[in-house]
Amino acid sequence: MPRYKLVLEYDGTGFAGWQRQDNGSTVQASLEQAILGFCGEQVVVTGAGRTDAGVHALAQVAHFDINRPTTPHTVRGALNDHLRRIADGPRRIVVLEVEQVSQEFHARFSATGRRYLFRIVNRAAPPALDRDRVWHVRPPLDIDAMNAGAERLIGRHDFTTFRSMQCQAKSPVRTLDVLRATRQGDEVRVEAASRSFLHNQVRAMVGTLTQVGEGKWTADDVSAALAARDRVACGTTAPPHGLYLAEVRYGERARGIAAARPEPGT
């Protein structure tokens, strides 16, 4: 049975998140509906990460199996055609890349790293064109202070303070490889990279760093919050609409298990 790996871009506005739900439109359900329309098969699409309601993706990765043999080029074209009809209005999903892979590949469990991007518009006036795609923060943010706070979180820690109380992960311990803030004009961008993240971890860290940038917290306060291992000790949690799943990384073994060479143009 052929397995196909997808790289997806989507606007999370209007979606109830990635995971299929009884109520509310989701990215996973929309993809499964598009596949049904394409080949008449009911499948389960597995994603590399379960983004929350309102969260966007620049390069989400997913996989699915179908009985019908076809080319990656055909899969991409067909799915985008069906998605245009399903994800209309404020909901948009685009399949950027398709690759046929072996049954060993798993979008979630084969991943060796994930990178998120959080966008903040830091100015007095609210955004017009990027509404629902950035977090609007009016007070000026001190990037150096934010990065000083971020340094306290990099490394292997118990991130209980920075995860949702509904988080289902067995362990709160994670290794944070990258957490840094940069400014591009009125926009502040926070990048976070790790093998995996806890539920709401990135948003909780960004919200806390924003308080540091505003001068309400210090880097020492960030360390104290981390050491508390208590969700109550966390700072503000940033809203979902500024968050983007920017990249999912795979090791050499996962990249080397392609079952067929993609057709030209994929």
Image: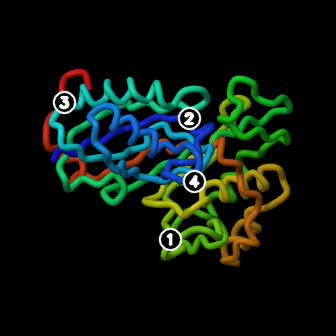
| Distance from Cα at disc 1 to Cα at disc 2 | 26 Å
- Left or right position of 78 against 182: left
**Front-most of 38 and 227?**
38
Q: Position of residue 135 (x, y in %)?
A: 72, 40
Q: Earlier in the sequence, mark 3 or mark 2?
A: 2
Q: Earlier in the sequence, mark 4 or mark 2?
A: 2
Residue 71's disc number: 3
Q: Amino acid at mark 4?
A: Leu
Mark 4 or 1: in front is: 1
> Residue at 45% of width from left, 46% of height from top?
28
Residue 169's disc number: 1
Label 1 secondary element: loop
Q: Are marks 3 and 2 in contact (CB under 8 Å)?
A: no
Q: Earlier in the sequence, mark 4 or mark 1?
A: 1
Q: Is residue 152 above or below residue 99?
A: below
Q: Position of residue 165 (x, y in %)?
A: 65, 70
Circle 4 residue = 179
Q: Amino acid at mark 3?
A: Thr
> Residue at 33% of width from left, 38% of height from top?
36
Residue 11's disc number: 2
| Distance from Cα at disc 3 to Cα at disc 2 | 26 Å
Q: Amino acid at mark 1?
A: Ala
Q: Position of residue 109 (x, y in %)?
A: 33, 60
Q: Earlier in the sequence, mark 1 or mark 2?
A: 2
Q: Earlier in the sequence, mark 4 or mark 3?
A: 3
Label 4 secondary element: strand
Label 3 secondary element: loop
**Front-most of 78 and 170?**
78
Mark 4 or 3: in front is: 3
Crowding around mark 2 (Cα neighbors within 10 Å: few <14, some 14 to 19, many 20+) is many
Crowding around mark 3 (Cα neighbors within 10 Å: few <14, some 14 to 19, many 20+) is some
